[in-house]
């Protein structure tokens, strides 16, 4: 699977999960989970922040 396909699938998953729950907090959790996944895949903090809407500092703080 190409990197962009993984990226798109992860974003789509995060959106489905968060909107399915019907709460704003769910979206944030989904984006943090997606960011964590991207980080473990070696994406830069700047790219992750741009894709998820999190700040660079929030991304760097993720485990």
Image (spheres, rainbow, N blue to C red):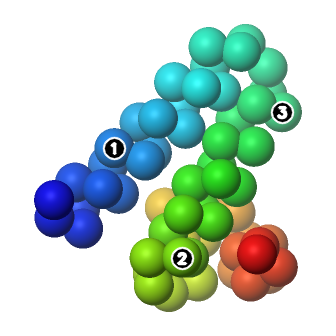
Badge 1 crowding class, 10 Å Cα cut-off, few under 14, some 14 to 19, many 20 or more, is: few
Q: Secondary structure beneath disc 2?
A: helix
**Disc 1 versus disc 2: nearer the observer:** 2
Disc 2 crowd rating (10 Å Cα; few below 14, some 14-19, many 20+) is few
Task: Name the spot of residue 7 as percent of width and height, x first.
Answer: 35, 57
Residue 62 in the image: x percent, y percent? 77, 73
Give the x, y percent position of residue 16: 51, 24
Whether 49 is drawn above or below 26: the answer is below
Q: Which residue has dot 2 on it? A: 40
Q: Earlier in the sequence, mark 3 or mark 1?
A: 1
Evaluate if marks 3 and 1 touch, with contact meaning CB atoms under 8 Å apart: no
Q: Which residue is mark 3?
A: 25
In the rendered structure, the answer to whether residue 36 lies left or right of residue 8 reads: right
Query: Looking at the image, is mark 2 or mark 3 nearer the viewer?
Result: 2
Q: Residue at x 22, y 54 (%)?
A: 5
Q: Secondary structure at mark 1?
A: helix
Look at the image and tell me in which quarter the C terminus lies.
Answer: bottom right
Image side of residue 3 versus residue 27, left or right: left
Say which residue label 1 marks.
9
């Amino acid at each position: 699977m190409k990197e962009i396909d993984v990226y798109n699938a992860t974003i789509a998953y995060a959106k489905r999960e968060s909107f399915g729950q019907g709460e704003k907090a769910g979206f944030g959790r989904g984006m943090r989970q997606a960011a964590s996944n991207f980080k473990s895949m070696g994406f830069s903090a700047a790219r992750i922040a741009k894709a998820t809407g999190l700040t660079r500092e929030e991304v760097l703080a993720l485990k």
